[in-house]
Image: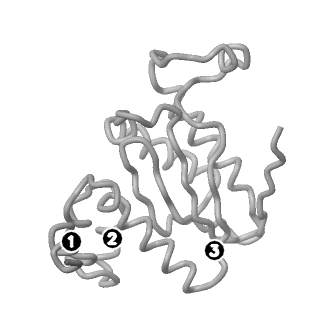
Amino acid sequence: MPNYRRAFVPGGTWFFTVNLLQRHGNDLLVREIELLRQVVRRVRNKYSFHIDAWVVLPEHLHCVLTLPPGDSDFSLRWRLIKTGFSKALPKTERLSSVRKAACERGIWQRHFWEHLIRDENDYRRHVDYVHVNPLKHGHVERVQDWPYSTFHHYVERGIYPLDWCGDVNETIAGDE
């Protein structure tokens, strides 16, 4: 069994990637976006955290979150988000014998990937990565066209221009 080593820094800021178990052809997260938003709000109300950046794609999500001073328990928050989302859905997914034996749902991958943000440059790079992800995965030709992202809040605050990162066609044409 792997020994996962996680950084626990009270009040720290982390980048996360959280994946659905079945990624190929799955659009569950955008199809059930309102449920996901409700669950995140409920968890935030009980266990505070600041959303620095967030993007929800059909089968995975990325975010940058900051915990309150003195708190380093991001695992609790992810467990509650994943569990709350899963419990609200009908049990229609295929379950492996291992998941059945453990009485687990087959919606999320068991673990998530996290990275402790080290400095302002690291923060900026990860926030940019979150926002460019729908373009990177080919879901849109312009970052501004993806509705499930904090990108739009960044535009409203004047941090990004609306045409940030251009579009796929301009980028490809410019590389020739």
Q: Distance between the residues labelled 1 and 2?
A: 27 Å
Mark 2, residue position: 153
Dot 1 crowding, Cα within 10 Å, few <14, some 14–19, many 20+:
few
Who's the residue at 34% across and 83% down the image? 159
Looking at the rendering, which quadrant does residue 30 occupy?
top left
Looking at the rendered structure, the kind of residue marked 3 is: Ile
Residues marked 1 and 2 touching at CB (< 8 Å): no
**Of the residues under marks 3 and 1, which one precedes in the sequence?**
3
Q: Is residue 162 visible?
A: no
Q: In the drawing, what numbered circle is on residue 117?
A: 3
Q: Is residue 159 visible?
A: yes
In front: 170, or 74? 170
Quadrant for the N terminus, please: top right
Residue 142, given in percent of the width and then of the height, sits at: 21, 66
In front: 116, or 22? 22
Helix, strand or loop under label 3: loop
Q: Is residue 144 left or right of residue 103?
A: left
Who's the residue at 15% across and 68% down the image? 169
Looking at the rendered structure, the kind of residue marked 1 is: Ile
**Of the residues under marks 1 and 2, which one precedes in the sequence?**
2
Residue 3 to residue 14: above or below:
above
Mark 1, residue position: 172
In front: 119, or 141? 141
Who's the residue at 73% across and 19% down the image? 102
Quadrant for the C terminus, please: bottom left
Q: Distance between the residues labelled 3 and 1?
A: 31 Å
Looking at the rendered structure, the kind of residue marked 2 is: His
**Of the residues under marks 3 and 2, which one precedes in the sequence?**
3
